[in-house]
Amino acid sequence: MTILTRRTAVAGIGAGVAAAGLGLRPASAALETVRQGYQTNMWGMPTYYLLRSGYLEKHGVKFEEFAVPSGNLTMQQMVARQVDMGTYAGPSLALGHDKGGMVAIAFIEYVGKTARVMARKELGLTKVEQLKGMKVANQTGSSTGNILTDQIMPKAGLAKSDWQEVRMNVDDMVAALAAKTVDAMCTVEPYNAIADADGLGTTLAEFYDFDKMPVFMAATPDFIQKSPETVVAYLKAWIDVAKDFKDSPDKVADSIYGFYTSKGYTMSKDTFKKALARVEVGPGWPSDLVPYMQKQAEILLGEKKIKAIPDWTKVLRTDFFKQAGA
């Protein structure tokens, strides 16, 4: 047993007081509980795996989870300060920063291969241009929704008045396609893979041809200010998750597949693995993110969806991940 002398105790107390006087917290300070938001489509599944992996507990981080159909809803929860962290793509990050000061603490994944525009198979459509006058299911306000309306449709020569947007959560779109209440859908995995496997849809466009779609882990400025040490510990867990995605893909797939089967989805494990393989997980900071975010913000500014182009040095906080990997 280690004997704690009075001198050691006093020295420790003194160090703690000194740290407090400098606005710092002692290394032994308890970490904050993270209120984690994530979307239940494939974009959010790396975060779901993080929560089930045990790696947060390994690094001393407790959490509460808040699942929603798409990342823009998580962003709205964060603006309302109901959630501390959440994943979403670049357009939603720019919107979240504009509305509530959200910052990215890490790039998590590329998801451009997971998003598609699909039409009902029996319509025999092959091009986006053919959607003129048709009903298209879209998660309005989401990153995919913004890219559809601001990039994909205009490139096909379709103005907003040329097609009918049917506002809908992504997890309801396959059922709507099957029921023929919509002619097409703009959605993400695993719902595209389900539509493929069930013979319901034909792909008209893949988002990867327009946008690699980086997804970020964002945090509220309040949480970062309150406990930067929790942010660093949290990102250490993400580094462990990245190793599993690279070295143990079957382990990862089994965990996430269980989520969808528990929700009543009947897709085969093979269909699911194909969908999951379209998510390119690699937490860190790719060098080309600032030009990408600048382009997305310029589009949003032109559409008057944000008030100004952000200062990317304040939005993309690369320092936390560097500390986590040190």
Image: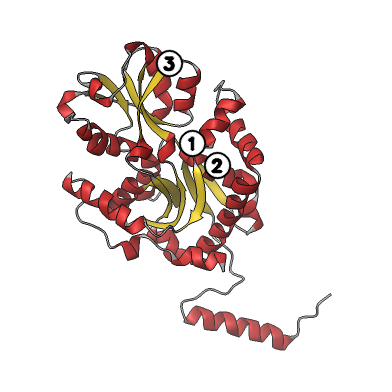
Quarter-of-image position of residue 195: top left
Q: Earlier in the sequence, mark 2 or mark 1?
A: 1
Q: Quadrant of residue 239?
A: bottom right
Mark 3 or mark 2, which has the lower sequence index? 2
Q: CA distance from mark 3 to mark 2?
A: 28 Å
Percent position (x, y) of residue 193? 48, 26
Neighbour tally class for label 2: few under 14, some 14-19, many 20 plus, Cα within 10 Å = many
Residue located beneath label 1 in the image: 42
Residue 111 in sight: yes
User: Which of the image's four quarters has the C terminus?
Assistant: bottom right
What is the residue that sits farthest to the bottom in this orientation? Answer: 7
Separation (CA) of disc 2 from disc 1: 10 Å
**Which residue lies at the image location 35% right of the left edge and 38% below the top edge?**
209
The residue beneath circle 2 is 48
Residue 200 has which mark?
3
**SS of the residue under disc 2:** helix
Residue at the image position 21 percent from the left and 45 percent from the top: 305
Q: Position of residue 26 (x, y in %)?
A: 57, 75
Q: Measuring from the top left, give residue 303's x and y in whole percent.
A: 18, 44
Q: Are marks 2 and 1 in contact (CB under 8 Å)?
A: no
Q: Secondary structure at mark 1?
A: helix
**Circle nearer the viewer, 3 or 2:** 3
Q: Nearer the viewer, mark 2 or mark 1?
A: 1
Three-letter code, disc 3? Leu
Amino acid type of the residue tagged 2 in the rendering: Tyr
Look at label 1 and name its amino acid.
Answer: Met
Measure the C-alpha gap from mark 3 to mark 1.
19 Å
Horizontal and vertical percent for residue 272? 56, 29
Q: Quadrant of the N terminus?
A: bottom right
Q: Residue 252 appears in which quarter of the rendering?
A: top right
